[in-house]
Amino acid sequence: MKDLPLPDLQLLQEWFDYDPETGKVKRKKATRNRKAGALVGTPRNPEKPYLSVGFMKKTYQLHRIIWKLYYGEDIAEGYQIDHINRDHTDNRICNLRLVTNNENCYNRGVYKTNKSGVTGVYYQKDRKSWRAKIGNNVIGDYETMEEAIDARRRAETM
């Protein structure tokens, strides 16, 4: 799903107040069903609980609005915001960074089905080997899990 273009900075500043220390956003103005001073942001998907906010009859991811409020500019084409600690509800500015999709893949957690305990290292039954990957980039196939983990860690530092 493609992100909607964000409203103008002036409009966002008129309606929202962001505290970079806590990551919280409050409404500056009251609406029909929301009070001025009320916190904004509700999780929309239990699998990826990014906080969203309804504004001007559209729904936006809160961390994108925060980025524009704090830095005063739109998110450049081809970039996205990464939550460094992987807590999608932690919108403190120190936890947000602008990255490419490929860079964001470096910060993925370990999948529930992962047997190696290391992100990007998994066993291939059909090949009877361990594969090391970063994002969509295959580093290689290895006889042992330890070799695959070592290759993945070396590739992370390049």
Image (spheres, grey):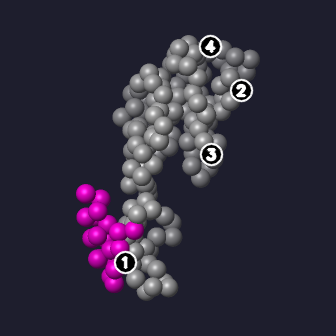
Q: Residue at x 50, y 85 (%)?
A: 126
- Position of residue 32 in the picture relative to residue 41 (left or right): right
Mark closest to the chain's N terminus, 2 or 4: 4
Mark closest to the chain's N terminus, 1 or 3: 3
Residue labelled with disc 3: 1
Label 3 secondary element: loop
Question: Can residue 89 be seen here?
Answer: yes
Mark closest to the chain's N terminus, 3 or 2: 3
Residue labelled with disc 4: 29
Mark closest to the chain's N terminus, 3 or 4: 3
Residue labelled with disc 1: 141
Tell me where the magenta segment starts and ends, as one range.
Answer: 138-158
Residue labelled with disc 2: 57
Q: Residues within 10 Å of mark 3 (few under 14, many from 20)?
A: few
State the separation of the CA atoms marked 2 and 1. 49 Å
* Amino acid at circle 2: Lys
* Amino acid at circle 1: Asp
Magenta segment includes 142: yes
Q: Foreground residue, 43 or 130?
A: 130
